[in-house]
Amino acid sequence: MNELVVETDGLTKRYGDRLAVNRVSMTVVRGEVYGFLGPNGAGKTTTLRMMLGLIRPTAGSARILGLPAGSPDVTARIGALIEGPGFYPYLSGRDNLRTLARYQSLPSTEVDRVLEMVDLTDRAKDAFKGYSLGMKQRLGVAAAMLGDPDLLVLDEPTNGLDPAGMADMRALVVSLAEAGQTVILSSHILAEVQEICDRVGVINDGRLLRESTVAELRGGATLRVRATPEDAALAAVMRIAGDEGVRRVGDGTLEVDLPATAAPEVVRQLVTDSIDVHEVTVAERSLEDVFFEMTGSETSRKKEVVS
Amino acid sequence: MNALVNSTRAELLRLRKWSAVWVIVGAWLALSLSFGYVFNYVAYKTGDDNFAGDGASNAQLLAGLMPSAIPDVIVSGLPMFGGALAMVVGALVAGNGFGWGTWKTVFTQGPSRYASVGGSLVAVTLFVLTMMVATLALSAGVSVVIAVSEGQTVSMPALGDLARAFGAGFLVLEMWALLGFLVGVLAKGPALAVGLGLVWSLVVENLLRGVGSLLSGIETVTEALPGTAGGSLAGAVVGGPNGTPGVLDAISGERALITVAAYVAVAAVAAVVVMRRRDLV
Ligand SMILES: Nc1ncnc2c1ncn2[C@@H]1O[C@H](COP(=O)(O)OP(=O)(O)OP(=O)(O)O)[C@@H](O)[C@H]1O
Ligand SMILES: [Mg+2]
């Protein structure tokens, strides 16, 4: 069950002086939705291109479905939408898919199936060049799904979609995942990743910073306690959270490594010790906080909840 | 092999539905009709010896319009006009795939890059063949109509002559189409490829041949150029320059044949090799 669908080893791509991708070693397991998260220019698309054999790594390697990336046996079993759809503008949506289906000798029923899945059946007869941005993107996802691939690689599939279209796209990915489809989904939309991905790889500046489940990445919540006198409060809270579990963060506030459910116990202890409790808050880290912390693109912000 | 057949079928589907390439075929047939038949026919009818040919007599003009002259007619326009149009087709087929991102899409479908690019080349070749068949059909149709309407006996050319002309014409077109394809691949786009290709085939080669007749050093270079080879191959079929631009006798027919075939092979192999190793973004 833990079969590795993707395994990259020190994947590196250099463009001139710039390391677009820097020794990325990542793994994707069969059946999971893997979120590939990173800010603009982080190296997501470049990494995916190397996985598909569209570009050759400067160093390192990628094995997809147990075979070297880019070998025909692999590409036949992958469906991909990489940085925007590439279609013949003069052909209709359907004829574009029919053309692609011929490369794999798929029947025309397969074209109908994927058109239906992205809700484009009504407009399938229209020329691709007349499609709206969102329709083009949906046709790209349809093309990726042709032939029921073992691995679906979607590079920012919700790009250009309106809120309803985004929701549809997420629902589609979720339903595919429920059917056991392995998906790599690159995105810089955190809510999207948090909502539909099992595991995430965070990439910034070409380096894979971390690879773990969404829950692991967010880590546990912490409590913030403001009480006086501070020294007495520190001693009291340490009896519950341990010496290592409490830190002074200034402003008469203590940061406690305990979940929200521990708040009543902490308050009770402080009151028992005759300490004045001014405020207890739960600081829950969202994926966004973690992301900004890791990528350093913005100081982390805390969501304050008064309890 | 299967992958090559699949790729060819896919590429044929999208070529068949591409109006741009049919516009080019239409333009070619209109050119063939005009220069091969209409102008000469008008000249014959009006009896003005100096209008079309260089003092060609009316009898000569009529002979050129008869079915027996089909081999000469289908080949004459190819070295320059047909070749230029075929090159545009090749450059469009290969070059547009970069801007549209369709090479990227095709290369993730399953067939190897060899098979995908090979299929595209086979499809272009079949397209060139279609262009030749259409040219032949047009010539046959028009010349028979003229012969009948002028009360001449309809005598068809010898099959061997016809096959020779058809083969030579096909090779010349194929050479230009594949050279266009290669330039489209190298330029990663159709615009530069079409522009450079046309300037080369229509202008630069002619200028070089002009200079070459003055300087023998350049002549050895011009004799190896595709335009010279294609023109001389056509010239060998029609029996020397016949007044149509591009039809030459600069090199022997045999050498022309070898040179044209070599260009076809080199262009095809080079296009596949370049595409196989290229990073596609
Ligand atoms: N063909 C190329 N030539 C030169 N530099 C490139 C090329 N492709 C990518 N890069 C550089 O590599 C880096 C990573 O680009 P990449 O497209 O992989 O980022 P990304 O994570 O997909 O970003 P986005 O979210 O904006 O799509 C960027 O700095 C980019 O400028
Ligand atoms: Mg990208």
Image: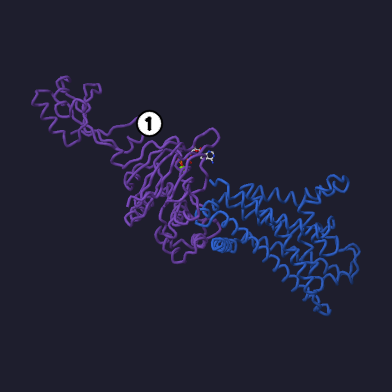
Query: What chain letter is assigned to the residue under label 1?
Result: A
Q: Which chain is blue?
A: B
Give the image location of residue A113, x and y in percent.
41, 63
Q: Nearer the viewer, residue B251 or A172?
A: B251
Tally of numbered tags: 1
Residue at 9% across, 23% down: A274
Q: Quadrant of the C terminus of chain A?
A: top left
For the residue carrying disc 1, how many other residues have a C-alpha within 10 Å: few (<14), some (14-19), or many (20+)?
few
Dot 1: element:
loop
Residue at 46% across, 66% down: A107
Give the image location of residue A259, x and y in percent.
20, 35
Q: Is residue B105 left or right of residue B197?
A: left
- Amino acid type, mark 1: Glu
Q: Is residue B258 left or right of residue B268?
A: right
Q: Is ligand 1 less than 8 Å from the beta carbon at label 1?
A: no
Q: How is the image coloured?
A: by chain
The hue used for chain A is purple
Residue holding disc 1: A298
Residue at 65% across, 49% down: B191
Give the image location of residue B131, x and y in percent.
69, 65
- Location of residue B279 by image quarter: top right
- Location of residue A289 by image quarter: top left
Q: Establish if B64 lies above or below B106.
A: below
Q: Establish if B213 lies above or below A294.
A: below
Q: Nearer the viewer, residue A99 or B53?
A: A99
- Location of residue A111 by image quarter: bottom left
Give the image location of residue A190, x and y in percent.
35, 41
Q: Nearer the viewer, residue B191 or A126?
A: B191
Residue at 73% across, 58% down: B261
Q: Is residue A18 left or right of residue B266?
A: left
